[in-house]
Each structure stands twice: as structure tokens, then as C-alpha cells.
Amino acid sequence: MWRRREVSYPKVEFDNTIYYVISPKEVGNANGLNVKFEGVVDDKPVLTYYVTGWPWSISSRLVEEDHGHRTFLKVSGVRVIFRGVALVSKGERVTVYGRVRDDTVQAHVIETSSIIFKSK
């Protein structure tokens, strides 16, 4: 019934999750996969704050999942979205662990030479 597709990329385990090691050029062919790739931050990352729910709702201010920060960045030409604050700068070398959706990586972890940023 459900068939797993064959993946020929090498695997690595990080935080009890399997990631496929790919190059930034191969991200477009890895939709739906957890991937790990390395690259350089192309532009200044954009940090945004978001709120969901109704503005007058007390739950939108008290419930942690209803608001937070997102970091948008490009790593070696690949669009990366990180749920949380990732303090990286233009030209910095990073390693990204995340899931590919529509040629965009939803990052779970961004690792630099000095720090590891993890989202929920």
C-alpha cells in the first residue's frame, strides 16, 4: 500500500532523528525528507515575531504556542525557516538540520562553530 522511496544519501543521527546528508544543490530533490547540509549564510537573516489567534483573546497572550519568533535566512541559496531565534550573521558557515517542504528547509537545528540553536 504505502511504499517507501529509495534514498541513496548517507544517513546521520542527531537528537534521535535520522537525517540524510546532502549538498545545498540537492535540496530540491529531497522534498519530504529530513536533511542535513552545510553552507554559508547568503544575506542578513530576518527575525520576525508572530501572534496567532484573536488579539483580544487572553489565550493568545498566555499560551506559548500562539506566539513566538521565526528566523528566515538563505544558506548557500537554500531558503531556511527556523522557528525561534537564530543569531547568525551574513557570511557565517552553518550546518542545518531540518525537513524539506516545497524547496524550503524547515530547520529543527542550526549549528555554528560556537553554538547550536534548537527549535521545539
Image: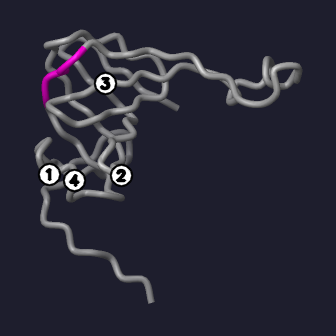
Task: Choose the circle earlier in sequence order: 4 or 3.
Answer: 4
Task: Choose the circle earlier in sequence order: 2 or 3.
Answer: 3
Q: Residues within 10 Å of mark 4 (few under 14, many from 20)?
A: some
Give the residue type that dot 4 points to. Answer: Gly
Q: Residues within 10 Å of mark 2 (few under 14, many from 20)?
A: few
Find the magenta span and give its range: 39-43
Q: Which residue is mark 2?
A: 102
Q: Which residue is mark 1?
A: 26
**Where residue 77 sits: x, y (%)?**
17, 33
Q: Relative to the observer, which residue lies in front, 66 or 48?
A: 48
**Where residue 103 sits: x, y (%)?**
29, 48
Q: What residue appears at the point 20 percent right and 29 percent down from the top-left corner?
A: 75
Q: Residues within 10 Å of mark 3 (few under 14, many from 20)?
A: many
Give the residue type that dot 1 points to. Answer: Glu
Q: Residue furthest bottom?
A: 1
Quarter occupied by residue 14: top left
Q: Which residue is mark 4?
A: 28
